[in-house]
Image (cartoon, helix red, strand yellow):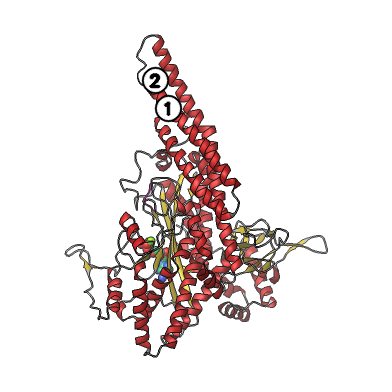
Amino acid sequence: MKEVPKLFGSLVFNETVMKDRLPTAIYKSFQSAVRERRPLDLEMANVIANAMKDWALEHGATHFSHWFQPMTGITAEKHESFIAPTAEGCVIMDFSGKKLIQGEPDASSFPSGGLRATFEARGYTAWDPTSYAFIKDDCLCIPTAFCSYTGDVLDKKTPLLRSMSAVSKAACRVLKLLGVKTSMVVSTVGPEQEYFLVDKKMWEKRRDLKYTGRTLFGAKSPRGQELSDHYFGAIKPRVLAFMKELDEELWKLGVFAKTEHNEVAPAQHELAPIYTTTNVASDHNQLMMEFMKRIALRHGLVCLLHEKPFAGVNGSGKHNNWSLATAEGKNLLDPGKEPYKNTSFLLFLAAIIKAVDDYQDLLRISVASAGNDNRLGANEAPPAIVSIFLGTELTAVLESIAKGKPYVAGKSTYLKVSENTIPALEKDNTDRNRTSPFAFTGNKFEFRMPGSTFSIAGPNVILNTIVAEVLEEFADTIEKSKLSRNKAIYELVKKAYIKHKRIIFNGNGYTDEWVKEAEKRSLLNLKSTPEALPYMARAKNIALFEKHNIFSAAEVKSRMDILLENYSTILQIEASTMLEMLHKDILPAITGYNDELTIAALNKKGIGINAGFEAKLADKLSSIGAKIYAKAEKLEKALAKAEATKGAQAQATCYRNTVLTAMEDLRSSVDEAENMLGGKYLPYPTYGDLLFGVND
Ligand code: ADP
Ligand code: MG
C-alpha cells in the first residue's frame, strides 16, 4: 500500500509547496491578492514563476502550458518547453512571470459563436490563481481563463468565476443584515460522476461507439438491469484495478476522489469526490473525466462518458451537489437540529426556491445537449421538468410559516436496527428521493440533471447567478422594510414560499401523473435542446446576466449559437454513422444470412424435403430488409434537408423533428432484424456482449 497522504497532491503546486518555496513576504502578498481578487504585479509573478519552474523541473517537467476550458466542453492545452537559448548556443530553462500570467494561444479554431471573426484570431489566456498549477504528462499546467482580443468571454471558467463573485457579494450582503460578518461566501460543489466501462476489443467493432460515444443500434439484451444486482455489487477485478489506478493518479493531482461503486446499470460505475470550491471542483472534474478515459485504456477498457450509451438501461448523469459556505466554513444550507428556528437557513432556502422557480428555463438550458436529451425523461433519469424536493419536515416547516402557525416539531425518529446489538440510528430530516431533479439532501442541494459529459461550469454559473439575483432582491426588501428585522425576514420567507411553492414536488418524478400535474402548475417542460434554447434570450435572462456581469447580450447570443450548432453537428454525425453502419455492416449481414437460408431452402426443396423454417425466416428477413432500406432512404432525405436548412435555430429544430425521428424509426427495424440474425452474421457485438463483457 502506497502512503496516500504523501501521494496526495504530490504533483500540485499547492499551499504547502508555495509556503515552502516562496519568500514569506511574497507568499503573504500573493495570498492577500488572491483573496481580494487583485491583479498580481509582475515582480511578484516573476518570483512565483521561478519557484514554480524549479519545482516543476524537479518533478520531471520539461514543458508548461496554459490549461483552459473553451466552449468545446473539454480542456485545451498548448505545450511550450521551458528552454531559452543562451549566447553560447546552449539552452537554459526559463519561465517568466509574464508567461505565467498571460498566454496568447491562437483562438481561431475554438467555438466562439460568431463573436470573433477568424481573422481576429488572437485569444488570451489569463492565470486563475484560485486553482493550483499541477503537472500532467511532464507538463506544468497552469489553470487559466480564456477570452478574445476584444475581451469577449470564450470559455467556461470566466463566467464561473464571475458567478462565484456575484453570489458571494449577494450572500455577504444578506448575512450582514442577519448580523453575520464574513469576508466572502463560497459556493461548494461535489460532482458525482457516472460512467460506463466496456471491453476495448468490443468497442473497436462498433462504429457508433467510436464515432459518437453511444450505441445507435442494438437490440435489448435478454438481461439488462432488471435484477438490480449491479448497484453497489462486488466490483470485478479488472474494474477494481482500474479504479485503484484512477484514484492514485487523481490523488497525485490533488483531486479528492473518495467513493467508487457500481451503479444501477450493468457496466455502469460512479466516482464521487469530496466537495470543494466550485471553480476547483470544475477543474478537477475535467481532470477526472480525462483520466478515466486514459486509464481505462491501460486496462483494455473504454470509458463511455456519454449520457445514454445504451437504450433501455440507465443513462449517466453528473449529480451536482451544491451549497454555500462562509469564509469560516459555515455551511449556509445546514438546517441544524431545529430548522424552524434557523432564520438564516430559512432565508437562504426561500431564496433558492424562488430562484429555481423564476429561472427554471435557465436551469433546464444549462443541462441541454443532444446527448442529455436522450437521458432526461428516460429510464431512471430526472424528467425535463425542473422541480424541487424538500422532504416532509422542511415542507411542513414552510407550510406552517405560510399558514402563520407555529411549527410543532415531531420527535426525532430513530431507526431500530436490532434490539440490543446495533445502536439505533437517527434518521435524517430529509428522506431520499432519487427521482427529483433538484433535491435537498440534508445540507446541500443535489442538481441531478447535468449530463455525464458536461463541464459542471455551465450549471453552476446558472445556480450561482440566479441565487445571487434573489439574494440581492431579498436584501433590498429587508433593507426597505419598516418591520423589525426578524418580522421582515419571516414575511419575506412566507411570501416567497407561497408564491413559488408550485416548484416543490416531493413525489415520484418519473410518473405520467407528475407530467400532468406539472402542466397544471404551469411549470415548463422543455423536452429537447432546440425547444429549450430560445428561452435563454428572454429579456429577464439577458437582464440577469448583464446585471451580474456574467455575459453581455452578445455573449448570450453566441453561446446559444454554439449550443445549437453543436446539437446539429452531433445529430449530423450520428445520422451519418447510422447510414455507414447500415451499408457497411448491417445490410451485408442481412443479405449473407438470407442467402444461406435461401440456398438451404432451395437445396431442401430440390430433394423434396420440407424447407421448414429456412424459407419462412428468409421471407421475414427479406421483408424487414426492404423496410430497413426504405427507412434509410428516408433518413438520407431528412439529413439532406437538415443540412440545407439555414439558421442555427431552424437547423437544430429540423434535426430534432425530422432527422432524429427518422433515426429512431430506422433503429427499431434494424434491432428487430438483429434479433433474427444467426450468431456468425451479427455485424457488431450485441448489448449483451457489451454490458456483460467484462468478467475478469
Ligand atoms: P450520496 O448518498 O448522494 O452519494 P453523499 O453524502 O455521499 O451523498 O455526498 C455526495 C456528494 O455531495 C459528495 O461529493 C460530497 O462531498 C458532496 N457534498 C457533501 N456536502 C456538501 C456541501 N456542503 N457542498 C457541496 N457538496 C457537498
Ligand atoms: Mg447522490
- Tell whether circle 1 marks a residue whose Cβ is less than 8 angstroms from ligand 2: no
- Image-quadrant location for residue 193: bottom left
Please state, as top left, top right, bottom left or bottom right, where the C terminus lies in the image: top left
The residue lying furthest to the left in this view is 419
Secondary structure, mark 1, is helix
- The picture places residue 619, in percent across and down from the top left corner, at 41, 23
Q: Magenta region: which residues?
A: 262-266
Q: Which residue is mark 1?
A: 621
Is 401 positioned to the left or the right of 482 in the image?
left
Q: Which residue is mark 2?
A: 615
Give the residue type at disc 2: Ala
Q: Quadrant of ligand 2?
A: bottom left
Q: Earlier in the sequence, mark 2 or mark 1?
A: 2
Mark 2, other Cα within 10 Å: few <14 / some 14–19 / many ≥20: many
**Vertical arrangement, residue 335 with respect to residue 89, above or below:** below
Mark 1, other Cα within 10 Å: few <14 / some 14–19 / many ≥20: many
Tell which of 505 and 54 is nearer to you.
Answer: 505
- The picture places residue 595, in percent across and down from the top left corner, at 47, 21
Secondary structure, mark 2, is helix
Give the residue type at disc 1: Leu
Residue 264 magenta-highlighted: yes
